[in-house]
Image (spheres, rainbow, N blue to C red):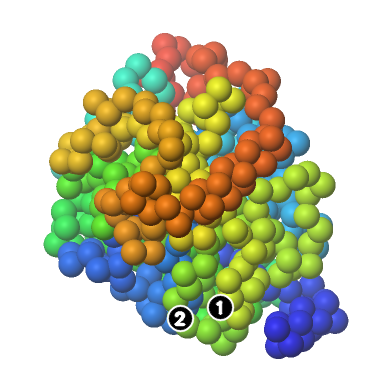
Amino acid sequence: MEVLMLGFALFSLCGAADLPNFVLLFADDLGYGDLGSSGHPTSLTPNLDRLVAHGLRFTDFYSTSPVCSPSRLGGLPLNETTIAEVLKPLGYTTAMIGKWHLGYGANGTYLPTRQGFDHYLGIPYSHDMGPCHNLTCFPPYVKCYGFCDVGTVTVPLMDGEAITQQPVDFIHLEDAYSTFATEFIRSAAQKRQPFFLYYPSHHTHYPQYAGWKSVGRSLRGPFGDALLEFDFTVGDILKTLKDTGVLSNTLVFFTADNGPELMRMSRGGNSGLLKCGKGTTYEGGMREPAFAYWSGVIKAGVTHSLASTLDILPTFAKLAGAPLPTVQLDGVDMIDILFNHGAGQRKAMFYYPVDPSEKFGVFAVRMGKYKAHYYTRGSAQSETTPDQDCRVISPLKYHDPPLLFDLESDPAENYNLSLKDHPELVSVLQDINNLKDEFQASMQFGQSEIGKGTDPNLAPCCKPHCSPKPECCQCGTAG
């Protein structure tokens, strides 16, 4: 801890140029068992694997929801505080590439540029939210895999708040992201300005696509090619950090938004030994691969400490010396875990379903190594698996007493520890119940004031006043 405190002191004394940089890599619909480093035999992820080998790997890291954002009600309220907004007052330059999916709004009200990001290149929502022909790519003989929304505008590519291409050229999209990210890093390094780069990738969300460098390169088919393409961009980012001399002053953190969409079968990802996947509150729905890399600062290793995406904002804020937002946060900083491989501050994880409500509340709670399921329910997004509990045919079930699992000896949640057979766990379950009641008493559910974005006039169109829509919304050139 003395070394860590000395580091904080040096950051404070040396000025903004010596503040740590942050790169946050966020995969989409990636399962616990999808990376080469997690044992998948045909995934090709050499750059991510290298980060794992030289970084700190989390075995018990959780997303906040079993889908890519906890709500589809509209844009992220402007009174919410992002990591970018936490860091900017300290002199950070901030950039985002990839999938925003937190709202567009009239005149771009909810875009990243209104939430603390100086620069943005990406798609403002999920790349499957457009008509099917959007995914035939350029040129048409390169096949993308999947079916998407019809009767809507084709997916736009945005640079800042301007639509530069519609429909997106998926074949060259990742190259554009890589160029944008590396140029941003080079510019910041040249100016000796601390930076935050956020890359929420479209990969490996269905339907998968891949550009020329990756298509057909993996042994895993379209999913593997998409994952490899993401890995190439990670490699470009790491090389640029090294070439510009800022690698030793940059924390790189990788994780994913939720578990694999098993309904897509071989093109939907893999949760490894964990139960179920996307859409469920079983481990496969919310437990994610995660690792932190900081050359010469964070020692390589493995941690079994409990942590979550909720903890990323307070961790970055603590390292930068930035004040936290003046609201009640559910996250805690991971400083003890990262620098001491310690137990950390998080004592519990609360699992909410895709449609959280005050009526049902928390579906499951993990405290230490034990997890209690108060409600279980299958999901269409975990359909096709042989486990009936995962599938949509498995209705909402209330469990009294809760199902209880030891996730250290049984991470696959196969063996319920009934209190009849394990009377020694009565007090453990009571502690979990108390924790759940205390947490739920602090929660407030409110109706979104933003709306559901059903106005067709708000659909992103590079020619706002053209007709007929959506066909006329076309601009930019491929390649």
Picture residue at 25% right of the left edge, 68% below the top: 39
Picture residue at 78% right of the left edge, 55% below the top: 324
Picture residue at 35% right of the left edge, 32% below the top: 377
Residue 323 relative to residue 350: left or right: right
Element type at mark 1: loop
Q: Position of residue 347 (x, y in %)?
A: 59, 58
Residue 20 relative to residue 226: left or right: right
Outermost residue toward the right in this view: 13
Quadrant including the N terminus: bottom right
Disc assigned to residue 341: 1
Q: Where is residue 220 in the image (x, y as percent from the top left)?
A: 17, 58
User: Is the residue 51 above or below the residue 170 in the image?
Assistant: below
Residue 244 relative to residue 471: left or right: right
Callouts 2 and 1 close, C-beta under 8 Å: yes
Q: Residues within 10 Å of mark 2 (few under 14, many from 20)?
A: some
Q: Position of residue 30 (x, y in %)?
A: 35, 52
Q: Distance between the residues labelled 2 and 1?
A: 8 Å
User: Is the residue 316 above or below the residue 69 in the image?
Assistant: below
Residue wearing tag 2: 301
Residue 210 visible in the picture = no
For badge 1, the amino acid type reads: His
Picture residue at 24% right of the left edge, 26% below the top: 393
Element type at mark 2: strand
Q: Position of residue 73 (x, y in %)?
A: 55, 25
User: Is the residue 280 above or below the residue 240 in the image?
Assistant: above
Q: Which of 155 and 253 is in front in this view?
A: 253
N-terminal-most mark, 2 or 1: 2
Residue 249 visible in the picture = yes
Outermost residue toward the top in this view: 468
Figure quadrant of residue 107: top right
For badge 2, the amino acid type reads: Gly
